Amino acid sequence: MTSTEKIIVLRFSAMGDVAMVASVLREFSVQNPAVEIFMVSREAFKPFFDGIKNLTFHSIQPKTIHKGIFGLFKLYKELKKYKPNAIADLHDNLRSRVLSSFFRLSGIKIKRIDKGRAEKKALTRETNKIFKPLRQTVERYADVFKALGLNIKLNHKLIKSTKDLPQKAELLFSNKSKKIGISPFAQHIYKVYPLDKMEQVISDLTKLGYLIFIFGGGKSEQAIAETWEKRYPNTHNLIGNFNLSEELAIISNLDLMLSMDSSGMHMASLEGVPVVSIWGPTHPYAGFLGYGQLESDCIQIDSPNRPNSIYGNKPCMCGVDSCMDLIKPETIVNKINEKLNG
């Protein structure tokens, strides 16, 4: 490609995957300053891409104006106005395939992510499991740009850039104690550390003098977080109180994030914050460890039954108990103490 190229990038969901794309595009933008990027994703995820130079965000509205084949053709006409030279399909689902096909018919070059489906099936199957680390998802994203003739080399390092706190969060940060974000929920229930055990973690961390901030979830999760807020000193529920841009700014001011294998991990990675992550039926070998995070900061049980799922939509049983139940709260607290205090 020449230095005046325009590239459309497709990744519509899920939240954590889109956050990983943002981590890659931050580096891509720096390494390819003359390439114009047009990022197509859901409007809710726009804050992930704030501050990336030479990037224009274009929202897809799949439930309304971009619904179905005719809606995707409308989106194609919207995007065609950018006069792209190539399409980087980082999603490879039905929508992205249909959309990119419109561009292919008009002579635009298309490259699509290799998700490594066969490798992932081998990693998670019950018998004859091939237990080995697979290519990281962020590298699979980078491979698409390389296939388009663009240079990108990921450094896999956390880059912290502290943002201004939202005004209504400033008082919460007036305490000089070390600040830990906790993202205790996930889209799939089997990826969630048992809430009674997580409550014990919160209790122990507050006794050690840490400030706790709880992120991520809807109304039911908010109710749980508010209960914890009332029970434990220096514990603050952020669910339902801040928008995504504000949450990212708050995360950028944390010392550490405790998260499931979920979007909380990827949001912290995007802000350059180290993460202690908890893994159940999923495994970092599948390639979804947060960008720049360390495998040594992953808390998980060694078991021949793990992993049995890529997305965490199936339970993992390690004997009588689930693999999540076998992780002790003190193991998590000790890892956080070690990470924050050496």
Image (cartoon, rainbow, N blue to C red):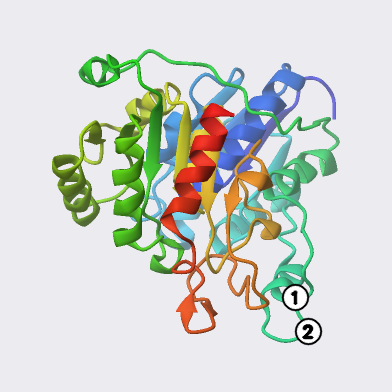
Give the percent coordinates (x, y) of residue 311.
54, 65
Of residue 326 and residue 72, the one placed in the foreground of this image is 326
Query: 320 or 271, which is in the foreground?
Result: 320
Is 231 drawn above or below residue 252 in the view shown?
below
Is 219 displayed left or right of 277 in the figure? Answer: left
How many numbered marks have been drawn onto this rendered protein structure? 2
Question: What residue is shown at x 30% (from left), y 36% (from top)?
Answer: 206
Question: Splitting the image into 4 quarters, where does residue 96 fall?
Answer: bottom right
- Secondary structure at numbered mark 1: helix
88 is higher (above) or lower (below) than 7: below
The percent position of residue 198, horizontal first and vertical second, equals 35, 54
Q: Which residue is situated farthest in the bottom direction here?
A: 127
Within-10-Å neighbours for mark 2: few <14, some 14–19, many 20+: few
Q: Which amino acid does label 1 sit on?
A: Ala
Q: Name the residue under label 2.
A: 128
Q: Is mark 2 on a helix, strand or loop?
A: loop
Residue plotted at (50% across, 39% down): 336
Q: Residues within 10 Å of mark 1 (few under 14, many from 20)?
A: some
Q: Are marks 2 and 1 in contact (CB under 8 Å)?
A: yes
Query: Image height check: is 262 above or below 215?
Result: below
- Is residue 96 in view from this perspective? yes
Q: What residue type is labelled 2?
A: Asn
What is the CA distance from the residue labelled 2 to the residue labelled 1? 8 Å
Q: Give the quadrant of residue 182.
A: top left
Quadrant occupied by the C terminus: top right
Question: In this view of the protein, which residue sits in the foreground, 113 or 63?
Answer: 113
Above or below: residue 207 compared with residue 173 = below
Label 1, on which residue?
122
Closer to the chain start, of discs 2 and 1, is 1
